[in-house]
Image (spheres, helix red, strand yellow):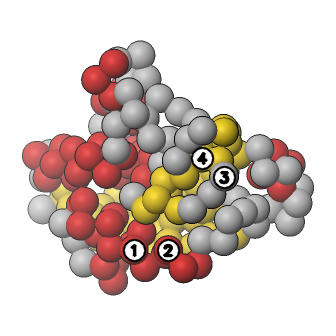
Amino acid sequence: MRIGIGIDVHPFAEGRKLVIGGVEIPSSKGLDGHSDADVLLHAVSDALLGAAALGDIGLHFPNTSPEYKDIDSMILLKHVGKLLRKEGFEAINIDAMLLLEAPKIAPYIEEMRKNIAHCLDIEIGTVSVKATTNEKLGYIGREEGAAAHAVCIIRQY
């Protein structure tokens, strides 16, 4: 068994779609980044890669590569799942926490869980997604950006 942790942060920007957990959420602004800036899927990807000692998403999907410009992060997470299987690992569970002040995420959590499970070819019951505010404190509280933290357990088969 191995444990991994992933953390990701992206600023909000006008004129961008808000995509979190592979779900497009109605909002006047989205997260800014080289890809679709899906902060949740990036944190999950980093947790899995770290647990397998395979580096991080910046190593596998550099933000200097035009190939990944505006790419759907579900494609990246699927690739991470393939890398894990190639190295003989499987995900046992994922627990992720999204931090943002607005919009409310609760109506989208089940779809996010399904997306993560689908990308990794695992059972939805092994994926937890939660969301919280930052109680109006810091850059998250001022609605300047969002963050996500994820932990996972993987095992070698």
State if disc 4 and disc 2 touch (CB < 8 Å). Answer: no
Question: Can you give x and y, in whole percent of width and height, for residue 15 in the image?
Answer: 60, 38
Amino acid identity at mark 2: Tyr
Residue at (70, 45) in percent of width and height: 145
Q: Picture quarter containing residue 156?
A: bottom left
Decide which of 122, 11 is in the foreground and name it: 11
Q: State how far apart marks 4 and 1 are (Cα).
A: 18 Å
Q: Could you say whether the residue bearing mark 2 is in a helix, strand or loop?
A: helix
Of labels 4 and 1, earlier in sequence is 4
**Which residue position holds label 4?**
30
Amino acid identity at mark 4: Gly
Question: Can you give x and y, in whole percent of width and height, for residue 37 in the image?
Answer: 50, 41
Q: Picture quarter containing residue 111?
A: bottom left
**Which residue position holds label 1?**
111
**Which residue position holds label 2?**
108
Decide which of 98, 17 is in the foreground and name it: 17
Question: For mark 2, does the 10 Å Cα neighbourhood hold few (<14), some (14 to 19), or many (20 or more) residues?
Answer: some
Residue at (60, 46) in percent of width and height: 30
Of labels 2 and 3, earlier in sequence is 3
Residue at (62, 57) in percent of width and height: 27
Question: For mark 4, does the 10 Å Cα neighbourhood hold few (<14), some (14 to 19), or many (20 or more) residues?
Answer: many
Mark sitting on residue 28: 3
